[in-house]
Image (spheres, rainbow, N blue to C red):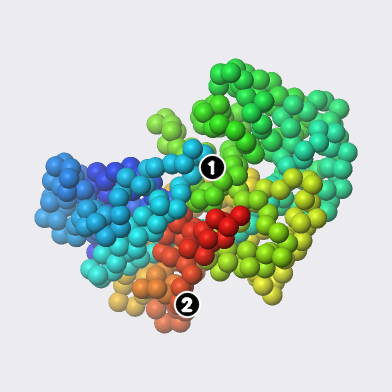
Amino acid sequence: MTEPAKLPDLPLMLAGVPRPVRELLREAGIPAEALPDVPLLAAGAGRFVLFDPNSSRSAARARRAAACGLKPIDLTALVAASGDLQELSLEHETGWRMAAECAVAKRFLEQLKSAVEAQGGAWVRLADFPFPYQSAICVGVEHVSEELADFANIAAALPGTATHFVSSRLRADRLAHLSQSAGAELGWQVLPADCENSPKRTLSHWTTRLARFAAANLLPAGLAFAGDRSQLPGMNRLLKLGLRYSCHQAPGVACRAETQSRAFPDAAWIRFSTLTLPAADRFLEWVGEHYQSGCPLFLAATTARIELVKELLRLSGDAGRCSLMWQTSFGEFARWWVHRRRLKLQVWRTDSGHEIHAAGDFGAFLASFPASFPWAVEIWRGNHRATLPLRQTEVAIPDEGLVYMKSSKRNPAGCTTPGENVRNLVADQ
């Protein structure tokens, strides 16, 4: 397949826009790259450039790009129709994007999509889940007793995708007991008492505990954390320990990546916003709204509610209700989200359809996940969406036969900005 001569519609070229905008686009799966100094000569440069007129350097770069034939999009015009862009960088005390921030992010991306489409451009995003899934569910079971006498029975009663969070303080005899339940994904249940009076001392203690787990061939991949996040060691240090994610019970965006390392820009710590189980009589409504909106369910439950966990998983696994719900673990979803951030797309709108080229983490993902889990892309036209698998690095998608579905309960930002119905259900808890 030969590359078209004209510049692609995507990625969007970013000329010095604020960091919250860059991160929002990356989390939403919208192809975007920094504007090169010579846009028409750089491989992969797109034909739309987003710039900030309040920055003289950004505005000057956008003018030079426009002189080369690129189409400038004024950031302030989008913000004026969306709300205070500063909301995008505000965080709740637990570090989560709250309702005000979600609303601004949703409106901003809708305005950006309209600006691109108004100039004849395509709006294509990397889907939030592997094809063909339209939503996902992860369940974390927090084992409140360090005796773990019932661990084997609980692990056997739940699908292998459940994540079991146990105390980081377990001694050798308890770890030997755990190692007998092969295949169960483990994480640490971390309480304020597990954090010392400084992150450095905490890191030292956790390094010793991880060595104890490793001696029993047990490798916890993440944390279920209750407490002040400032007590945790830095993200880079946790990544070096082999930990990859943390779960915090809080409303807000289901998951987001945190990056702090200039030396390892692709390294990311994944933060999950977990929800508590509702009453059993609300399961149908609860699961249904998340499923239809494309918002994943990341759940935390103690062993005291294990029967409700079983009922929820049975319900979400019902093919008649949720045929495209991805039942996965926190560790696997965290790996997926990191790989997804690394994939780069180029998109051309052609006379007969779309052409998409993929680069970046395409091969690494296929090596880490089953072949039945290809990448997925969403092609949007107004409020209608078509979802397709992306199994090759270059693919031509003809308009003929492409099926678009009206997506009234979804938005072109995906699960980075959950819909109103989902937020209302969360707020009611």
Q: How far across and how far down the image is residue 28, in percent?
A: 43, 55
Question: Could you tell whether 8 is left or right of 216 in the image?
Answer: left
For the C terminus, give its image quadrant.
bottom right
In screen coordinates, is 277 left or right of 392?
right
Which residue is labeled 2 in the image? 405
Report the quarter where the N terminus lies: bottom left
Q: Amino acid at mark 1?
A: Ile
Residue 312's place in the image compared with 97, above or below, is below
Residue 140, above or below 422:
above
Q: Is residue 9 left or right of residue 149?
A: left
Say if 219 sits above or below 233 in the image: below
Mark 1 neighbour density, 10 Å: few (under 14) some (14–19) many (20 or more): many
Residue visible at 83% across and 48% down? 154
- Marks 2 and 1: in contact by CB < 8 Å? no
Residue depicted at x 69% and y 36% = 189
Query: Which amino acid type is shown beneath numbered disc 2?
Result: Met
Determine whether the residue tagged by mark 1 lies in a helix, strand or loop.
Answer: strand
Specify the farthest residue to the front.
428
Q: Earlier in the sequence, mark 1 or mark 2?
A: 1
Give the structural element (helix, strand or loop) at label 2: strand
Q: Which mark is residue 270?
A: 1
Q: Residue 80 in the image: x percent, y percent?
A: 24, 56
- Tag 2: Cα neighbours inside 10 Å, few (<14), some, or many (≥20)? few
Disc number for residue 366: none
Tally of numbered tags: 2
Q: Nearer the viewer, residue 403 or 197?
A: 197
Residue pictured at 43% horizontal, 31% vertical: 261
Q: Could you say which is closer to the camera, residue 210 or residue 95?
A: 95
User: Going 54% across and 32% down the picture, which residue do you hit?
Assistant: 229
- Residue 282 image point, x, y percent: 67, 64
The x, y position of residue 419, in whole percent, is 48, 62
